[in-house]
Amino acid sequence: MSHSPADLLVTGCTVLVHDDQERIAFAPDAAIVVRDGRIESVGGAAEVAATGPAALEHIDARGQVALPGLVNCHTHAPMVALRGLAEDLPTEEWFNDVVWPVESNLTEKDVELGARLACAEMIRAGVTCFADHYFSMDTVAAVVAECGIRAHLGEAYFSSQGPQGREKSLEFALRHRGTADGRITTALAPHAPYTVTDADLAATARLALEHGLPVHLHAAENRDQTDTSLARHGLTPVEVLDRAGLLATDLLIAHGTGIIDRDLPVLERASGRTAVATAPRGYLKFAWPDTTPIRALRALGIPVGLATDGAASNNSLDVWESMALTSLIQKSTESDPRWLTSRQALHHATLQSARAVGLGDSIGSIAPGRRADIILVDLTGPHTRPVHDLAATLVHSARSADVRTTIVDGRVLMRDRELLTLDVPAVVRELEDRLPALVDQSHGRRIQEYDT
């Protein structure tokens, strides 16, 4: 251990740690030492105080719990600009009558303002990393670099854009991977099997393997898509991905509520690293009959990360809420109160989410050598007392508003609820001015057709 001062010392907190079996445990009265963006040590506060490194910055976190920063494994951050615009609609009308016509108005400035607002919302809710799949992603990457959050970014494309959509996605992924001091990782981002042709999916798989890039897409989002795919092609969406070679890549599938039993052996045979992101609030809102089959996927060793989807369908980017809903909906779906437990929900929110976005070796737990993505949660409020079971308190009683401090790569982005890297009032003022032009649908265009 170096004797020069550490960059950051967090003391007095209870720390969520994973043991060597990946079970969740809590270490009371602990101290976390951070140096050069990494966690140098996690130990007893008294022992660190006695021997301990001086630090350039010290946070007294008594009464708080330190968790690995949450990961939003699938979202469309700039869509916060459309929050509450398309309400109480079935999926097809939601896309065709509102979202896709409005998205044809998007300018880079709209995307920038939406991304700023989204990053502010996520940092305040304890999200330290998000996987994004959208348009004008150069703009989103610039916002990520500036505000200090971590992100896994892909430039989305439809086959209706012609070959240049796919080429732009590849070019973005190669140009931005490893940027923002390593906080940005990238993926190829075909939209979905129902908007991207088999030939484009196969070309994407080849490019991913050739360039060592992962792929992030929507697939088997709901049961209707699976039924339509079977009627049209004799294959489920997962089988379509397999035929295209995408299950040989590192693949992140968004939603998967339409994954059925015949898909499970296909996923189990996959030679790449497959993961699924679940965003349960939107499924409830669209009245989809099923949810992500987490139990079946976990039995195959497929990580299921937590997500919110875009705020146009989910109305928030609150992964904390996704964690509680995932636990509750799984209990209801499986008719088993023992699945998913609070500890399992915390595992999905931390290590499994980190794995889902390909960062399982660097984030997702508070341990020496990991990147210092840490959030401090205040459990002194009346709604979180008393604490009989800390995991249950965190999942079912605490709220994202209880996050006091958010740290990414050792840099404090929010301290005591104050955002340090983003000016929300200025963003909101500018966004409000742009809304009339953004929501105008009189042009009669839409960027795509939803027809599954």
Image (spheres, rainbow, N blue to C red):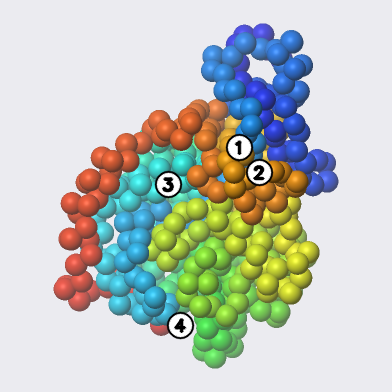
Nearer the observer, 128 or 343? 343
| Mark 4 to mark 3 CA distance (whole Å) | 32 Å
Q: Are marks 2 and 1 in contact (CB under 8 Å)?
A: yes
Residue, disc 2: 385
In the rendered image, residue 357, in percent from the top left (x then y), is placed at: 58, 51
Three-letter code, disc 3: Glu
Residue at the disc numbered 1: 380
Front in this rendered view, residue 438 or 212: 438
Around disc 1, counting alpha carbons within 10 Å, would you say few (fewer than 14), some (14 to 19), or many (20 or more)? Answer: some
Point out the frontmost of discs 4 and 3.
Answer: 3
Disc on res. 121: 3
Which numbered disc, 1 or 4, marks the residue closer to the eye? 1
Q: Quadrant of residue 423?
A: top left
Q: Nearer the viewer, mark 2 or mark 4?
A: 2
Q: Are marks 4 and 3 in contact (CB under 8 Å)?
A: no
- Mark-to-mark CA distance, 1 and 4: 49 Å
On the image, which quarter does residue 39 sit in?
Answer: top right
